[in-house]
Image (cartoon, rainbow, N blue to C red):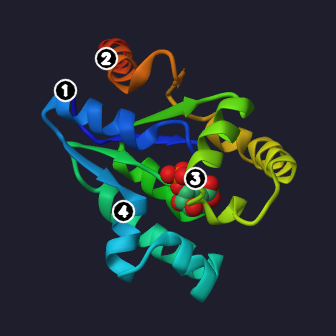
Amino acid sequence: MEGPVLLTGFMATGKSKVGRALARRMGWQFLDTDAMVETRAGKSIARIFAEDGEEAFRRLELECVVEASRQRHAVVALGGGAITQDGTRQAIRDAAGVLVCLQADEETILERVGRRGTRPLLAGLTREQQREKIRALLAERAPYYAVADITLSSTEAQGAEETAALLLRQLETWHAEG
Ligand code: S3P
């Protein structure tokens, strides 16, 4: 396989966990653009949003996406909103890798983000407001996620290892057919 595996999908669909498990199975490097942004800024994403605003976050995110997508043998977990940026979509095309979208249903997402509270886009909202926001963002982003080469759902029951194993088989089929 040549070219990176890029993982997109909404917040809390398991991109980092599945991506790390997939990278281990492939013997490839794992990169997480959220973690790269935090290292570069020297602070958490929540603090970047609070102190510098979403635009500043998106600029940093784009730099990290461009850098990560240049790696040939890497599995890259993209932040959930990265693909809405023109520059990210261009970087994905330039990478000539495989774009994978992980999906989870609204209830699962709500349950997972509620557990952690680290997502600034959903911070300070009641559970009902979070549900509304998730629904609106999912609708707005659906066309971007829809262009993925492979789409699969990550369910709690299945676990990250099993999802990664399933994804690896799909990647092999995809490459064989490509
Ligand atoms: C965001 C998703 C987050 C992070 C930031 C913004 C989004 O990443 O990049 O909070 O716009 O959906 P995850 O998808 O890893 O939660």
Q: Is residue 56 above or below residue 93?
A: below
Q: Is residue 178 above or below residue 24?
A: above
The residue singled out by tag 2 in the image is 165
Which part of the image, by quadrant, shows the C terminus? top left
Residue 106, quarter of picture:
top right
Vertical relation: 168 (above or below) 67:
above
Disc 2 + disc 4, Cβ < 8 Å: no
Give the amino acid type for the residue marked by disc 2 in the picture: Ala
Q: Percent x, y for residue 161?
A: 32, 22
Q: Nearer the viewer, mark 3 or mark 4?
A: 4
What amino acid type should be assigned to the residue bearing mark 1?
Arg
Query: What amino acid is at disc 3?
Result: Ile
Q: Is residue 81 visible to us here?
A: no
Mark 2 neighbour density, 10 Å: few (under 14) some (14–19) many (20 or more): some
Work out how far the residue at label 3 is from the one at label 4, CA to CA, in angstroms.
17 Å
Numbered label attached to residue 83: 3
User: Which residue was labeled with disc 1?
Assistant: 25
Image point (25%, 46%), residue name: 30
- Please report contact status of discs 2 and 1: CB closer than 8 Å, yes or no: yes
Task: Work out whether residue 73 can be spotted.
Answer: yes
151 left or right, relative to 30 = right
Which image quarter is the N terminus in?
A: top left
> 67 or 48: nearer the eye?
48
Of 16 and 114, the residue lying toward us: 114
Residue picked out by circle 4: 35
Left or right, residue 3 beside residue 129 = left
